[in-house]
Amino acid sequence: MTIFDPGRDRAADEFPINGKLIKFDDAIIRVREALNAVRLTPASEHQAVMIENGRTSHLTTDAKIVLADHPHGQLRAILSDEASAFTVNEIGQIWPKDQIETDEFNLIWPAPEGQDWVLERKDEPDVVLRPGSTIAFGPKGVEHIVSRKRHGADKLLVTVMTLSGVFPAEGGLRVKSDETISSVLEKAARKLDLADTSGWIVSVAGNDINVSLTFAQAGLTGTVELDWMPREGGGGNA
């Protein structure tokens, strides 16, 4: 993990860069100096953001940082051509790359109590963030992340596992219990560009599932992983 724990103590002449506390001789430093201190060279080929109190801001390599003005701040820098913009609960944010690990995201923006972080994409269903995944930004990625009340008993978090990838890549699809399993598979096929799934079977924990049923009819609740694969020895091409 590359984010510095904001609860840890640090001296007035120390500043965290990519999770490491670096001691500086001067009270005012330039971003270039900070990146050189952790061997992120050439500094000009890296994108850097200041993270402080749930806010992020983009910094050029020549920008100055007055250490005393940022007692809770830290730098996150990545070798990248361009920073990515998005929102968290309608607050504009910036990240030095076109993707971020969900574990790192949750360290910067802990979800409010009793709520989940949900990815919102135009014309696509909500996806609930889950640990160990990645959020992609950019033209076809996520633009808005919002907190929503944790789903009740009538909702499931569904992930589809295929040989061509995982849908959704960032977490679990929020699905109503009366939705058919086949409707989720259709979404997965479109997202993963699966051209021919004829003869494929769906299983949960090794048990075959009738995809024409709703999740409730199939007895599926909570967090569900659908394994969607060609039947052994059968057809179906991605």
Image (cartoon, rainbow, N blue to C red):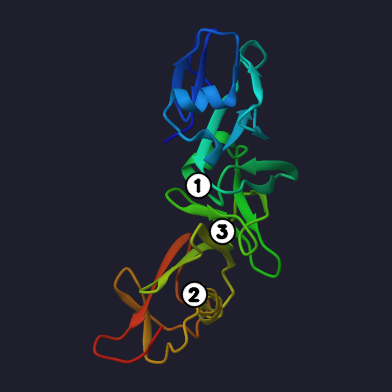
Viewer-proximal residue, 166 or 32?
32
Which disc, if any, is residue 186?
Answer: none
Which disc, if any, is residue 153?
Answer: 3
Height in image: 170 above or below 1? below
Q: Quadrant of residue 198?
A: bottom left
Mark before the other along the chain sequence, 1 or 2: 1
Residue 93 in picture, x, y percent from top left: 68, 41
- Looking at the rendered image, the disc whose residue lies closer to the viewer, 1 or 3, is 1
- Looking at the rendered image, the disc whose residue lies closer to the viewer, 2 or 3, is 2
Cα distance between the residues tagged 2 and 3: 28 Å
Which disc, if any, is residue 102?
Answer: 1
Q: Which residue is drawn at 52% across and 34% down?
A: 43
Mark before the other along the chain sequence, 2 or 3: 3
Q: Mark 2 points at which residue?
A: 192
- Which amino acid type is marked by label 2? Leu
Mark 1: which secondary structure?
A: helix
Q: Is 228 left, or right, of 134 in this rendering?
A: left
Q: Which quadrant of the figure contains the N terminus?
A: top left
Q: Which residue is drawn at 53% across and 41% down?
A: 45
Q: Which residue is drawn at 38% across and 87% down?
A: 237
Mark before the other along the chain sequence, 1 or 3: 1
Q: Crowding at label 2, few (<14), some or many (≥20) Cα neighbours within 10 Å? A: some
- Which amino acid type is marked by label 3? Ala
Residue 139 in picture, x, y percent from top left: 65, 62
Height in image: 45 above or below 36? below
Q: Crowding at label 1, few (<14), some or many (≥20) Cα neighbours within 10 Å? A: some
Q: Which residue is drawn at 61% across and 34% down?
A: 49
Mark 3: which secondary structure?
A: loop
Height in image: 172 above or below 58? below
Cα distance between the residues tagged 1 and 3: 24 Å
Q: Is 208 left, or right, of 20 in this rendering?
A: left
Query: Can residue 4 be seen in the rendering of this structure?
Result: no
